[in-house]
Image (cartoon, grey):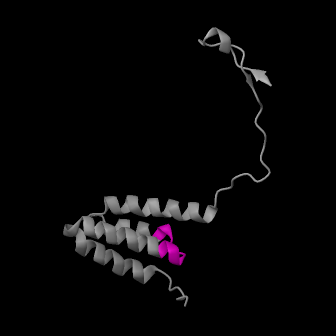
Amino acid sequence: KKSLPPMNMPPGMMHIEVPKLHKSENKYTINTDVEEDEKKKRSVRSILNKLTPDNFEKLTQQIIDVGIDTPSMLANIIELVFEKALAEPTFCELYANLCVKASAAAPEFEIET
């Protein structure tokens, strides 16, 4: 046990013993699949925030390059584009065109029944 260095504390609390921390046998580990999907989702959201008719082609390609490699990632992108289209109805046509381009570039996934 170690003592804390003296600080501006009341006189009776100057020498508090602090126990050492122990290492856990089952430490927390980050699920890398979820982390990777979240990174991609944030990246797509960032690209969608910048999307305009002037930079449509470039940013559409960036969204495709993020990688739609799992059904969950496809669902995430669909959700983001849908929310963006609802929030910004003036760019609805732009988001529809984005969906057409992205669907042509995305792989087909098996439907699980």
Residue found farthest to the top: 11
Quarter the C terminus occupies: bottom right
Instruction: Name the residue: 37% across, 65% down.
Output: 59
Residue 42 seen in this snapshot: yes
Decide whether residue 70 is among the magenta residues: yes
- Rendering quarter of residue 9: top right
Q: Nearer the viewer, residue 78 or 15?
A: 15
Q: Would residue 63 appear left or right of 89 to someone viewing this image?
A: right
Q: Would residue 83 appear left or right of 10 to someone viewing this image?
A: left
Q: Which residues are magenta?
A: 65-74
Quarter the N terminus occupies: top right
Measured from the top left, where is residue 93 in percent x and y? 23, 75
Residue 68 seen in this snapshot: no
Q: Nearer the viewer, residue 27 or 91?
A: 27
Q: Nearer the viewer, residue 97 or 57?
A: 97
Instruction: Name the residue: 59% across, 11% down.
Output: 8
Please state the total of marks drawn on the protein image: 0
Q: Would residue 2 appear left or right of 42 to someone viewing this image?
A: right
Decide whether residue 15 is among the magenta residues: no
Residue found farthest to the left: 90
Measured from the top left, where is residue 97 in percent x and y? 30, 77
